[in-house]
Amino acid sequence: MQRTIISNLKNELGKEVKINAWVDVRRDQGKLIFLDFRDASGKVQGVILPNNSEAHSVGSEVRPEWVLEVLGKVNPRPERAIQKDKFNGDIELEILSISVLNKAETPPFEVEGDGKEVSEEIRLKYRYVDLRRERMKKNILKRHQSLQFVRNFYSKNDFIEIETPCLTKSTPEGSRDFLVPARIDPGKFYALPQSPQQYKQFLMSAGFEKYFQIARCFRDEDTRGDRQPEFTQIDVETSFESQEEIMEKSEQMIIDLVESIFPEKKIQSKPFPRLSFADSMEKYGTDKPDLREDKEDENLLAFCWVIDFPFFEKDDDGGWTFTHNPFSAPTVESMGELMEKRNIENIRAAQYDIVLNGYEIGGGGLRNYTPEALRKVFEIMGYSNDKIEHSFSPMLKALASGTPPHGGIAFGFDRIMMLLLNEPNIRETIAFPKTGEGRDPLMEGPTTVAPDQLDDLGIAVQD
Ligand code: ASP
């Protein structure tokens, strides 16, 4: 007999079926044993009637999380037992026979409920059990639907998805890099990308014109609720488009995503309001203002754009550093000051951030596409010619090879999911996240490695 998935049982009323499922809940009432079953498609209540002694003896042995094959008959529930608000609340599976496919040890915590009372360390250690709970399944499913939506949106708009490397070179992009020792060149290191920034610009040099990628990014920073050492960006870049065109397309993507996958949400104002950095700081004291008119309403989304950022700010040593991205272009009005390296504090970047309910969910900019202008940025930051060559010569060469004007944006996908799913942190939206301290309790990483692995790399670990 072919397997019927649980969500299709209601089409089989009165028939005998076979299901494969986990025991979700077991209630032994002596004469009657109730087993609630769960598969990827949903749940259903099963019952073993007193006259079925064989099923009864297996049924009194099985426990939650055991995996079964069950033959049963789909019956309508008697009127008084109908649960209208429950999935499959109007049917019941009369269990005819049970075979145990696999037993399960007593689970480390209940799969029922939202799991918020369980320590996160334990939830992550047994993530494969934690992900069985309805809340987590829903989060992962919504994440999948959102990713599919984003892929379709950009593909339909003639963008092509291009993968870029995870093993790349360490460059100063604002955060600490994760380094990967190179066996083929002892003493040298790859770095994991903080973002595909330089590669997406190379793709513009290469003439692809419209690129996107669901990209994994790595930043060795202290983890917070809305940060993880590895995270997912929706990364986008286009050639020959104005700041206005890039912002409009990005806004459309976000609106369409919300309206198709999260229809219960209400977007407070469309088009999204725009604020200059200076106005936002003056009015709200932050460049990530929470513009919600009603902060109690969990379905209200207040998006806004923040623009006109200063290009440079003073670093801890009193020198200049970039506020967002060294590759940003200045605004048209600021180009003269950049090229002449004067009035540095007044130079504005053609940079735009998108904010949702007080969180920055994305940011991008037009880029400096001439090598002369990019060089000026590094000179203002006090980089020597040697440092510029060492860190940025591939980009400067690419810009000198016939690179079109271009710009783009990147969205923090995990953060967007956190906000749309009303979760308190991004870990609740990622299948296998690190803990708040950046460790992986499931695989128990990071770990020490065997001495010969270190020898291969020419590495000695200091005590
Ligand atoms: N690469 C930038 C970031 O990761 C985003 C962008 O400007 O496209 O923040």
Image (tube, helix red, strand yellow):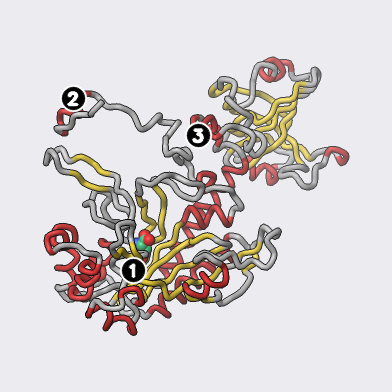
The disc at residue 363 is: none
* In the foreground, 333 or 139: 333
Q: Nearer the viewer, residue 24 or 440?
A: 440
The numbered mark at residue 124 is 3
Please state, as top left, top right, bottom left or bottom right, where the C terminus lies in the image: top left
Amino acid under disc 2: Asp
Quadrant of residue 133 within the rendered picture: top right
Amino acid type at image mark 3: Leu
Secondary element under disc 3, as helix, strand or loop, is helix
The residue at which mark 1 appears reads as 312
* CB-based contact (under 8 Å), mark 3 and mark 1: no
Q: Earlier in the sequence, mark 3 or mark 1?
A: 3
Res 452 label: 2
Q: Residue 385 placed where, x, y %? A: 13, 64
The image quadrant that residue 47 belongs to is top right
Name the residue at the right extreme. 80
The answer to whether residue 431 shows anywhere in this view is: yes
Q: Quadrant of residue 48?
A: top right
Precedes in sequence: disc 3 or disc 2: 3
